[in-house]
Amino acid sequence: MHIKEMLDEAERTKAPSFSFEYFPPKTAQGVQNLYDRMERMYDFGPKFIDITWGAGGRIAELTTEMVVQAQTYFGLETCMHLTCTDMGLEKVNDALQKAYKAGCTNILALRGDPPRDQDTWIVTDEGFRYARDLVKHIKETYGNHFDIGVAGYPEGCDDNKDEDLLLDHLKEKVDMGASFIVTQMFYDVDNFLRWVRRVRERGIVIPIIPGIMPIATYASFLRRAKHMNCKVPEEWLAALDPVKNDDGAVREMGRKLVTEMCRKMLDAGLRHLHFYTMNLAQATRMILEELNWMPCADRPRKQPLPWKQSLGLG
Ligand code: FAD
């Protein structure tokens, strides 16, 4: 099912929904551990999951392998990220074909980060300089088979802090055929809501999905926020600093702070939240519990995993 359809349904029924992002781990054991965790987190009830795209050889292959596993084996609606980094036409088509064969119908089309050993982004194929080129190619090649999402930047992009210019470029991606927007992580909700208004003023009407990073430990929270140039409100630092050496207390405080920001967005009319899980379950689970969104006796999850259904389990 297309993500746009799921989001439209959430809008129609006013029923909030959520999704999870995972990234390809570096080791075979890491991959197995993640599959186990994805299976457990299936029970939390995400509408769909995303698998990020890592530039270069094995990591890129792993993205497509994980998409096949999640879409066909777990039966989870899966959105494959695809970037232009290190990608020529042949590689782009190969990745799309693998996703297509797996029954995946959702792609997040991105320009991509530079590879780890490079500071700046270098074009590999003139046909794929910007994310909009990828959106255009996917539309031209696959028509409406894939629902296409693109990235949005309420706090500015690494190589561009000019909000007006970024909005122009966002509009181009939408005009090329994107039907939903997923944002970078952020903790400043007021700024995000201001940005949403600016997006709408530009005539962009497609759904916007806020990207939310739960807090697992103080060190990882700060590292990630710094890496992503994400503004952390002063009151968050003041609340977390006194408990920074106690991981359990940090998670509890994180539960409170992140849930508050989720509620504020839901109150403002947002229907769908996207969690950057960092391949971990606990911190995301705590927020879903706090929002009262975890399946329980009164609200059982709808269906067990397809392979469990076929064995009469679950
Ligand atoms: P674009 O929209 O193409 O923009 C890239 C830069 O080019 C911007 O500065 C933009 O302003 C500029 N630009 C765009 N169009 C034009 C134009 N017509 N003329 C001049 N300049 C232009 N990275 C990964 O490597 N793998 C992932 O899986 C991944 N997932 C992500 C998921 C989300 C939700 C987000 C927000 C980011 C993700 N990223 C990922 C990071 C992303 O690839 C980088 O932030 C990248 O630098 C920008 O990608 P983009 O798709 O926004 O690019």
Image: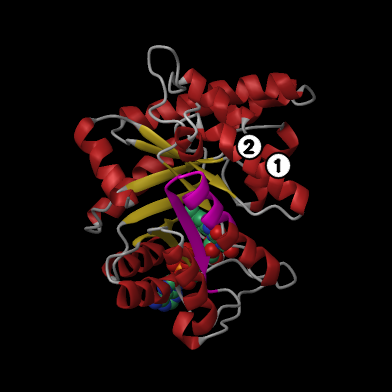
Rendered image: mark on residue 33: 1
Residue visible at 37% across and 38% down? Answer: 272
Rendered image: mark on residue 37: 2
Structural distance between the alpha carbons of marks 2 and 1: 6 Å
Residue 23 percent location from the top left of the image? 61, 52
| Quadrant in the picture for residue 136 | bottom left
Residue visible at 49% across and 25% down? Answer: 288
Whether the residues at callouts 2 and 1 have beta carbons within 8 Å, the answer is yes
Left-right relation of 209 to 308: left
Above or below residue 297? Residue 232 is below
Magenta stretch: residue 76 in it?
Answer: yes
Residue 90 percent location from the top left of the image? 52, 83
Residue 184 percent location from the top left of the image? 50, 50
User: Circle 2: is it few (<14), some (14-19), or many (20+) Cα within 10 Å?
Assistant: some
User: Label 2 sits on what residue type?
Assistant: Arg
User: Circle 1: is it few (<14), some (14-19), or many (20+) Cα within 10 Å?
Assistant: some
Q: Give the range drawn in magenta.
A: 66-84
Residue 53 or 309: which is nearer the viewer? 309
Residue visible at 54% across and 78% down? Answer: 91
Residue 83 or 129: which is nearer the viewer? 83
